[in-house]
Image (cartoon, rainbow, N blue to C red):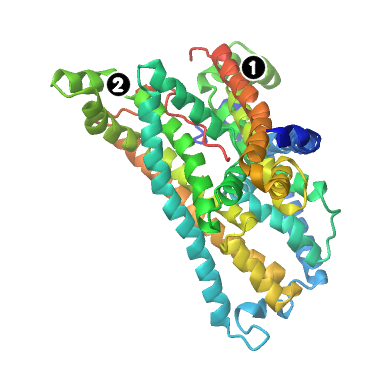
Amino acid sequence: MDAVIDALPRYWSGFTMTLYLWVVAGVLSLIFGTVLAAFRVSPLKSLRVVGTIIVEAGRNTPLTLVFIFFVFILPAVGVILPLGTVPAIIALTCYTSAFVCEAVRSGINSVGVGQAEAARAIGLGSVQTLTNVVLPQALRSVVPPLINVLIALAKNTSVAAGFTVVELTATGRSLARDNPADVIWMLAGVAFFYLLITIPAGILAGYVERKVVFAR
Amino acid sequence: MSRKNESSVLYDAPGPKTLRNERIVSIVFLTLLAAGAVWLVLWMIDLGLFDDRWAVFTDPPKGQSAEVVWTALGKGLLTTLKAAAIAAPLALALAFVLATLRTSRLKVVSGPAVAVIEFLRGMPVLLMMFFGLLALGLPALWAVVFGLALYNAAIVAEILRAGLVALPRGQFEAGTAIGLTKWQTLRMIQLPQVIRLMLPSLISQFVVLLKDSSLGFIVGYEELLRTMQLNYSFFGDQYRFPLFIVVLAIYLAVNITLSRIAVIVERRLSSKGGGATQLKDAGDGPEVPVQKP
């Protein structure tokens, strides 16, 4: 137990690195995922097809393989990325965007067609229909799954441990090696810091879900 | 609703003018896309990505035969599938136990089950694999299986629970009315229906599990990705790209096939829809967001 307390500074730096990856990749994924979702619900078939291909490829590729691409494959063909957090953030963003897109898209599709028809029937234009009728409803069903995607992202940042980024999991691994007598405690400490992110986020998701429930 | 596509809530059915405009914008977009693709290909040629490095699959260097490369990749795929195939039944069995405990009406039983499920769901799979590897001293394969089984057990337990909640209450009442105990009702009446109801979610979760088996790469399990790496370190760095493309194609083929099966099963189940397993009246109950761990 003492070893855990001694290791607190290292835990802290690992935790801040995990938080950093989470926030930066999270914001970027939200942006790119929403753009992709706009592709997938656009009236143009060509845009929809392109969006579908990107999302399907993203969702069916293991995250480790995405990391390998940016860390080992691209440099070998002459595209050198700075080592460390940059390839990690790009890989996490590429991967998570596909899931953000699916969450946003299903939210938009969950709004009944009748809603838009009713809006048009009372004479609202397309922009008014979108901003006053469709989006407020879509947002409600988008937020809880989006929080779940972000929780998954927080856990996924651990994959960066395999690619030279010293975040929480990598910290835990080296702490476990340095303290062979306290391996279980060392890893339990890491687990605690992850729960510090995932449990509050999960509670928030549940709360939002209950708060925004409405009859359709 | 003259338009059959699913996103018609956003826009009205197009008239002749809109159709013409759409066609024009489509053509412009596709031209841009094609230009981008051509530029990408030219750039890749410039980098030398289409030179003789693809010969690694037909006539590899260092006196090896093409068979050796393909058998290595095949074996890599098999080791990946092996880890997933061991972990999946374990996860399912553990999930049954967790879901049963979770739905118990005794707080003493359901409380700890909730705690265990929430704990496991909040953990990165990789950390659990490291736990198996470093704390329990398991060999790499079993560390991978340990992480995959525990994590997915928690997720599948939640899927099963959602299914149990979605099942009409009459099923349970009928079971107890004919004199079955609660446990018998669960085992003989509720769970068989829940499995059927939740089969699409279970298959999608299996895809997630299969993708996560690639984390074995980090904990030193010699699966498909590690095989790829061993191959390019043996043959040389210019073979990284072709080997990567083939491994990517293998993963996409396997996972997309499985995902398609899930969609087909889902469609079949909802088109039959008969009996007690009414998917539709379950509201948003069974929609467990299958997220990537």
- Give residue B84's mark: none
Residue B119 position, x and y percent, is 55, 30
Amino acid under disc 2: Pro
- For residue B51, above or below residue B79: below
**How dense is the environment of label 2, judged by Cα within 10 Å: few (below 14), some, or many (20 and up)?**
some
- The answer to whether A139 appears left or right of A19 in the picture is left
Q: Residue at x 77, y 61 (%)?
A: A74
Chain to which the residue tagged by mark 2 belongs: B
Mark 2 lies on residue:
B168
Distance, label 2 to label 1, CA atoms, is 32 Å
Residue B224 position, x and y percent, is 57, 63
**How dense is the environment of label 1, judged by Cα within 10 Å: few (below 14), some, or many (20 and up)?**
few
Q: Residue at x 86, y 53 (%)?
A: A82
Residue B95: quadrant of the picture: top left
Mark 1 lies on residue:
A136
- For residue A3, above or below residue A212: below
- The answer to whether A142 appears left or right of B24 in the picture is left
Chain to which the residue tagged by mark 1 belongs: A
